Image: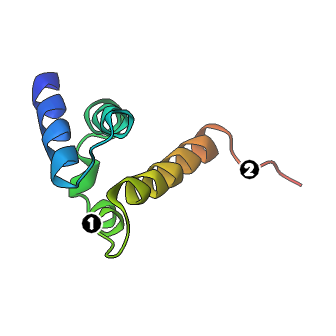
Amino acid sequence: MLYNRIYWSLRSGREYGLTQPAARGSWVLLGSVFLPYFWLTETGRADLMRPGCDPHQRYADYYAVIKALNKRQADPWPLP
């Protein structure tokens, strides 16, 4: 099962145009361990397929949003 997740994460990273090793590694880690098959969701696909942007920038933007959501869930907003 983990092998399949890693395989499809690596393959989808190539299909979305990631060529930098650091970006690919981050994509595979996110797609196989933390958020499996994130590129198949409707919002994920919309963010990752934006026209006119570099694939690495699109992924960096998407990763920043995911990271912010994770931080917000782990560290909720402080009450006034």
Residue that appears at 28% across and 49% down: 38
Name the secondary structure under disc 1.
Answer: helix
Asked where in the image residue 58 lies, by quadrant, the reply is bottom left
Q: Quadrant of the N terminus?
A: top left
Horizontal side of 75 relative to 10 (left or right) equals right
Residue 43 percent coordinates (x, y): 33, 65
From the top left corner, tell me how far across and down residue 9 is, in percent.
20, 39
Residue lying furthest bottom: 51
Residue 12 as seen in the image, left or right of residue 49: left
Name the residue that disc number 2 marks. Answer: 77
Is the residue under label 2 in contact with that under label 1 (CB below 8 Å)?
Answer: no
Q: What residue is shown at x 52% (from left), y 50% (from top)?
A: 64
The quarter of the image holding the C terminus is bottom right
Residue under label 1, please give it: 42
Q: Residue 34, position in %: x, y?
A: 36, 34
Relative height, residue 71 to residue 50 (above, below): above
